[in-house]
């Protein structure tokens, strides 16, 4: 336990102040052991028959923790673990030492308050903008809410720690029982270990700000994963991988990063953790991801490993079509370090690199026969199966683009019933056309309106109550529809296709417009990015 006294600073002081507030004190949680904190400590010590010297060490810490209304022992499951950092670093192809450095410097070490709720900081100037975004005039609601609703940034109203939830709740009730106001309030707070603002929820892949907030409440692991998504969405990974500390800090911490020496702190923390890894014999850097078109020594290394595993390819340092196919063949029949199927995408990232060096064959392997109708499954939709049969026939016939991007007779055939010419994305028109043929060619008999919009088709099915999420206990069946969002959840852009079948943790699909031709694709069902969900069409 850390010894704290007057003028001590840091996260331990924040925790001390939060715990003292649980006992009825009203301290500002600022991480500074000031006179008010010392007085609260002396008062606590007097109340609990301790020496009232204002110094916090073993006996005072024990009384504080054991007597708090919150069972801190139950918080352990929410805390970040070494394995979490390793896993996220691997998934992002970032040196573990870099992730540890960022975690130390940027997260301040704790994602939760002493009461079990995520650490937050409410920003009244952001709340102003978020209300405006939702068509609500903030100026009409300032009176009585000056501490949570203001046009320009100020730290004058910060309370810190648990007390920030008082400000959040006050903001939620600026207009009681108004969902738009509540969403605006949640979007105006920064959350968890890395203090990610709630308004980023869409770019992080959440369908709602409350979904983001709920995830932040689960644990520091979820907070770390959200941070990883934030790094990807804001194109910050390159700066970390190249150890461009100043460039990263400028974009993550803002233009005043140098005044707080964030770049220097990151560099020093990295060297500390890198030296520890080196002492332990761990690799200093992770291999970068490579794919079709890549060249160089790393590609040669990949090709050598593939040959050792009996996937015959030329060792020429060029990631060509033959190498890509060999990678896909390997991925389709091997597991990663977590005993999960590899994504069959032909890209050699961190998980595939590990699997190549530690090959764990799956029970089932072999070529996926997309050109064959899969065996019928209990609960599948007869109409969906009929549409899938049409899609398979198109695949076998070589349907796809001819003469350029989104062009050709096949595309025109799919787009014509939607009233659109060739040249537009055609994935949804392909799905619509297959269902049109499945009902005999009469558009009046279709279960949804013929459309060239992926999100439009999926929303129609969702409105009929036919959709279900990737986390649902309901499993995708042959002939079901699968839909993804593209660009962002709010953009309205999407992609859609057919479920061919599910097996061994993989989802196999038939899709138009993902490649130039109608083709089959496979995904690890638990690692599908940008997934909107599935729908069973009746």
Image (tube, rainbow, N blue to C red):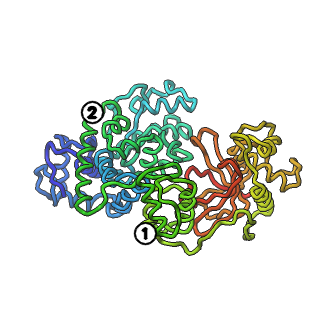
Mark 2 or mark 1, earlier in chain: 2
Based on the displayed image, in which of its 4 quarters is residue 300 positioned? bottom left
Which of 301/280 is in front? Answer: 301
Q: Nearer the viewer, residue 7 or 517?
A: 517
Q: Is residue 508 above or below residue 271?
A: below
Residue 20 in the image, given as x and y percentages of width and height? 25, 50
Q: Relative to residue 169, is residue 269 drawn left or right? A: left
Q: Secondary structure at mark 2?
A: helix
The structure residue drawn at horizontal position 54% and vertical position 64%, both measured from the top left corner, is 331
Q: How many C-alpha atoms fall within 10 Å of the one at disc 1: few (<14), some, or many (≥20)?
A: few
Quadrant showing the N terminus: bottom left
Mark seen at residue 358: 1
Residue 325 tag number = none
Which quadrant holds the C terminus?
bottom right
Q: Residue at x 45, y 64 (%)?
A: 305
At which x and y percent is residue 88? 41, 55
Depth check, front residue: 395 or 254: 395
Q: In this figure, which residue is indicated by the disc labeled 2?
A: 258
Front label number (2 vs 1): 1
For the residues labelled 2 and 1, the Cα–Cα distance comes to 43 Å
Q: Nearer the viewer, residue 246 or 535?
A: 246
Q: Secondary structure at mark 1?
A: loop
**Is residue 472 visible to the viewer in this orientation of the structure?**
yes
Along the horizontal axis of the image, is 513 left or right of 448? left
């Amino acid at each position: 336990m850390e010894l704290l006294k007057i003028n001590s600073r840091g996260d331990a002081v924040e925790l001390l102040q939060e715990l003292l507030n649980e006992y009825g004190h009203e301290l500002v949680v600022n991480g500074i052991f000031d006179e008010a904190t010392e007085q609260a400590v002396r008062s606590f010590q007097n109340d609990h028959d301790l020496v009232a010297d204002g110094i916090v060490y073993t006996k005072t810490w024990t009384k504080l923790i054991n007597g708090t209304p919150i069972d801190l022992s139950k918080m352990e499951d929410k805390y970040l673990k070494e394995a979490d950092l390793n896993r996220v670093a691997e998934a992002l192809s970032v040196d573990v030492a870099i992730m540890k450095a960022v975690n130390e410097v940027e997260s301040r070490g704790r994602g939760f308050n002493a009461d079990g709720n995520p650490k937050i900081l409410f920003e009244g100037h952001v709340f102003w903008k978020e209300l405006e975004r939702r068509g609500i005039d903030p100026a009409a609601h300032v009176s009585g809410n000056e501490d949570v609703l203001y046009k320009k940034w100020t730290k004058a109203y910060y309370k810190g720690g648990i007390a920030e939830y008082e400000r959040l709740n006050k903001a939620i009730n600026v207009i009681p029982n108004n969902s738009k106001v509540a969403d605006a309030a949640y979007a105006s707070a920064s959350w968890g270990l890395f203090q990610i603002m709630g308004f980023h929820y869409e770019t992080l892949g959440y369908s709602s700000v409350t979904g983001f907030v709920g995830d932040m409440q689960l644990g520091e692991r979820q907070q770390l994963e959200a941070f990883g998504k934030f790094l990807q969405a804001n194109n910050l990974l390159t700066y970390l991988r190249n150890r461009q500390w100043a460039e990263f800090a400028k974009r993550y911490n803002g233009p005043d990063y140098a005044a707080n020496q964030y770049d220097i702190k990151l560099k020093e923390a990295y060297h500390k953790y890198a030296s520890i890894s080196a002492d332990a014999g761990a690799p200093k850097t992770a291999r970068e991801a490579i794919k079709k078109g890549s060249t160089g020594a790393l590609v040669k290394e990949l090709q050598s490993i593939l040959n050792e595993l009996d996937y015959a390819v030329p060792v020429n340092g060029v990631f060509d079509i033959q190498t890509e196919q060999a990678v896909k063949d390997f991925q389709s029949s091997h597991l990663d370090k977590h005993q999960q199927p590899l994504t069959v995408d032909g890209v050699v990232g961190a998980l595939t690199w590990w699997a190549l060096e530690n090959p764990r064959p799956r029970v089932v392997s072999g070529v996926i026969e997309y050109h064959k109708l899969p065996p019928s499954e209990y609960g599948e939709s007869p109409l969906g199966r009929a549409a899938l049969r049409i899609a398979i026939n198109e695949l076998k016939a070589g349907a796809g683009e001819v003469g350029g991007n989104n062009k050709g007779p096949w595309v025109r055939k799919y787009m014509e019933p939607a009233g659109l010419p060739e040249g537009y994305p055609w994935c949804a028109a392909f799905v619509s056309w297959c269902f049109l043929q499945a009902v005999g060619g009469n558009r009046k008999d279709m279960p949804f309106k013929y459309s060239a919009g992926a999100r439009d088709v999926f929303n129609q099915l969702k409105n009929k109550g036919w959709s279900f999420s990737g986390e649902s206990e309901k499993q995708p069946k042959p002939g079901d529809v699968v839909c993804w969002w593209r660009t962002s959840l709010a953009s309205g852009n999407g992609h859609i296709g057919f479920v061919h079948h599910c097996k061994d943790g993989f989802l196999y699909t038939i899709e138009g417009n993902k490649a130039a031709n109608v083709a089959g694709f496979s995904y690890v069902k638990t690692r599908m990015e940008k997934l909107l969900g599935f729908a069973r069409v009746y």
